[in-house]
Amino acid sequence: MKFYSHGKLLLTGEYTVLQGAQALALPTKQGQSLTVTASEENALHWKSYASNGSCWFEAVLELDHFSIIQSSTPEIAMRLSSILKAVRQQNQDFCRQGTTVTTQLEFDRQWGLGSSSTLLANLSQWAGVDPYQLLKTSLGGSGYDIACAQASQAVLYQWVEGTPIVESTPFDPPFKEELYFVYLNQKQDSQKEVAAYQKKAPDPALIASISGLTQELVLCETLTSFMAILHEHENLMTDHLNRVRIQEERFSDFKGCVKSLGAWGGDFVMACGGSPTYFKNKGYSVIRNYSAFIL
């Protein structure tokens, strides 16, 4: 059996999606597969492969309680064991016989495109369980990445009183050739960032404003209006998080607009207008245009 899920990028909403704001999320063309084969050994053999073909993690777990028999990275093995136990909470018959699992990433696992969320989505398909419930009982988070995992186009996503509201939207801006994504190579711990943000009191006015900007963005027909909405979104989040805008901090002389994505200041930013050469000249080597990157 083979299962597949797409990676993700969060274009609007950022942390406010945790408190009910509507966000625009984009599934990426690259994702992660999970292949399951029967084994004669009474254990679960797990191998995870990186996008370059190298095996970055390997473990053997017993089947009764997913206790670790051996592993290449104990910390990751413990996290995997915890996730598998959470799967079994929903499906008591899950993985009771000898099994070999192989996972294959299509994107660099440092890029923050969802190596964890695609894993949860694939496990949920295999076990026939609710991926949002699995997220809740394992890694935590808003669930927008789970929504992207099985999406075929952009999604409008809200997390309202513990319930995910997912609406597919044909987001295909006519100016998409002027949109591209730049990897900052500054890894963020999204779980830690999310946990810290959830301690903040919700701001109903901010949530309403972000939701409104998300809806405006989906309907944008010109790059000028698109960038104006992004500027407004960045200003709102800057004030709320008490942080400096990424464009002001690093790219103040860039002629277009630079938008933070996800856990601010970390993995990718989206650039609009200007030239990708600007970022190449600053030493950023991973630059992907919209059409090549987004499903």
Image (cartoon, rainbow, N blue to C red):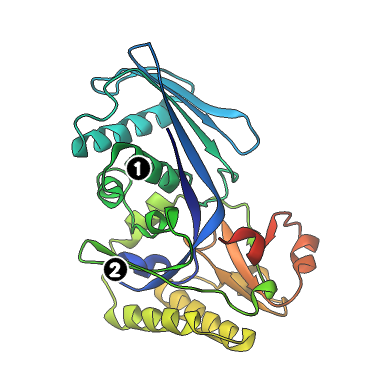
**Dot 2 corresponds to which residue?**
19
Q: Is residue 180 left or right of residue 46?
A: right
The amino acid beneath tag 2 is Gln
Of residues 97 and 274, which is closer to you in this image?
Answer: 97
Q: Quadrant of residue 281?
A: bottom right
**Dot 1 corresponds to which residue?**
125
Q: Quadrant of residue 86?
A: top left
Tell me the quarter of the image containing the C terminus: bottom right
Q: Secondary structure at mark 2?
A: helix
Q: Is residue 255 above or below residue 29?
A: below
**Distance between the alpha carbons at the discs numbered 2 and 1:** 27 Å
Residue with the most extreme front position: 1
Mark carried by residue 32 = none
Q: Is residue 268 above or below residue 120?
A: below
The x and y percentages for residue 232 are 50, 84
Q: Is residue 129 above or below residue 229?
A: above
In the image, what residue occupies the spot 72% across and 80% down?
255
In the image, what residue occupies the spot 30% across and 33% down?
84
Q: Quadrant of residue 75?
A: top left
Q: Secondary structure at mark 1?
A: helix
Tell me the quarter of the image containing the N terminus: top left
Of residues 209 and 199, which is closer to you in this image?
Answer: 209
Q: Is residue 72 left or right of residue 41?
A: right
Q: Neighbour class for label 2 at 10 Å: few (<14), some, many (≥20)? A: many
Q: Is residue 183 left or right of residue 92?
A: right
* Label 2 vs 1, first from the N-terminus: 2
In the image, what residue occupies the spot 57% across and 72% down?
259
The x and y percentages for residue 10 are 47, 64
